[in-house]
Amino acid sequence: MNEQYLQPVLAYLMSLQDSICKRIEQLDGEARFQQDAWQREQGGGGRSRVMKNGAVFEQAGVGFSHVHGAQLPKSATAHRPELEGRDFNACGVSLVFHPKNPHVPTVHMNVRFFIAEKAGEEPVWWFGGGFDLTPFYAVEEDVIGWHQHAKATLDKLDESLYPSYKTWCDDYFYLKHRNEARGVGGIFFDDLNDRPFEDAFAVIQAVGDAFVDGYEPIVKKRKDTPFTEHQRAFQLYRRGRYVEFNLVWDRGTLFGLQTGGRTESILMSMPPMARWEYDWQPEPGSAEARLTEYFLLPQDWASKRIEGSADDA
């Protein structure tokens, strides 16, 4: 195995999990993450950390996993025939936070690395990841700031990355059976191997390191906003869309289940509570209608101005 590839990535991912958990505990101010270490019978394991019933977060999960084996599932080799007959290592950090307050968005982040090897041949490797925001009662300045932060993060490495990864995110986190975006997007990429290893590795490090800095200001501004039972019900209804995406469309969920990963850890992203209602429609002109009619439509958020900013002075 090419340790020069795998070991620095593993060290970074475990450190990233530690640092994110520490900052989110400070942000919540009440609850703490509980760790559940697990082993995979076919090879590998991970550390699942879950926070429940905090002051801010109803449930927050941050998982690290490293699984390896001698054979990939058919779903992987069907799309990547060059992986047939290769040993593989797949590792990553993935998180989803479900806040209590409907005015605080749900958020997802993932960074990952994959390498497949065969004696006498060059390894096949790539990176993937990103972060995206799923508000219920969206605030334009939050969405703009989120995208501007993502753009600034990637622009430091390569100014061509944000436009590409933003579009990729819009396309990927889309519920085709609903003709509807899951949220307001962010950045997403996969199969990153078109640059030297260290440069590609730097991309997931930038994404992982920048995540909390983009999310924390939104949480601090919205966590104490009063909310009604109606707004809570709408939050649970929209969480149902999150469940639908993860179970129907998410490739990471499918890969984890097909490679014999730990089901509890794979489904850690699910909200603790959600609801469905047959053919529910929001009141015209309501905040609930504005979510789907405006905020969930892909837009060039990073180019917009935040009202009251220095640019508007």
Image (spheres, rainbow, N blue to C red):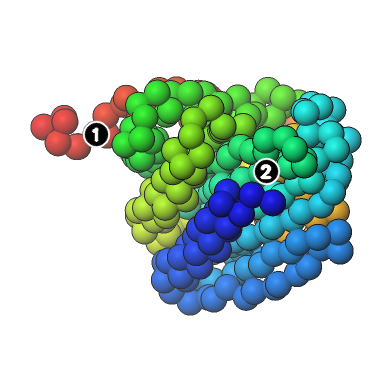
Q: Residue furthest left?
A: 313
Nearest the camera: 227 or 273? 273
| Relative side of 65 to 248, left or right | left
Residue 120 visible? The answer is yes
- For the image, the number of numbered tags is 2
| Relative side of 177 to 205, left or right | right
Residue at screen point 86% across, 59% down: 42
Is 161 drawn above or below residue 255 in the view shown?
above
- Crowding at label 2, few (<14), some or many (≥20) Cα neighbours within 10 Å? many
Query: Label for residue 307?
Result: 1
Mark 1–mark 2 CB contact (< 8 Å): no
| Residue position marked by numbered label 2 in the rendering | 115
| Relative side of 99 to 138, left or right | right
Q: Quadrant of residue 58?
A: bottom right
Nearest the camera: 105 or 202? 202
Residue at screen point 61% across, 45% down: 113
What element does badge 1 sit on? loop
**Residue 143 screen position, x and y as percent:** 40, 37
Query: Label for residue 194?
Result: none
Q: Quadrant of residue 313?
A: top left
Considering only order in the chain, which callout, 2 or 1, is on the residue closer to the N terminus? 2
What element does badge 2 sit on? strand
In this rendering, which labeled residue sits more in front, label 1 or label 2?
Answer: 2
Nearest the camera: 104 or 123? 123
Residue at screen point 77% across, 42% down: 119
Is 47 drawn above or below residue 151 in the view shown?
below
Residue 182 visible? The answer is no
**Residue 88 screen position, x and y as percent:** 75, 46
From mark 1 to mark 2, how far is it between C-alphas?
45 Å
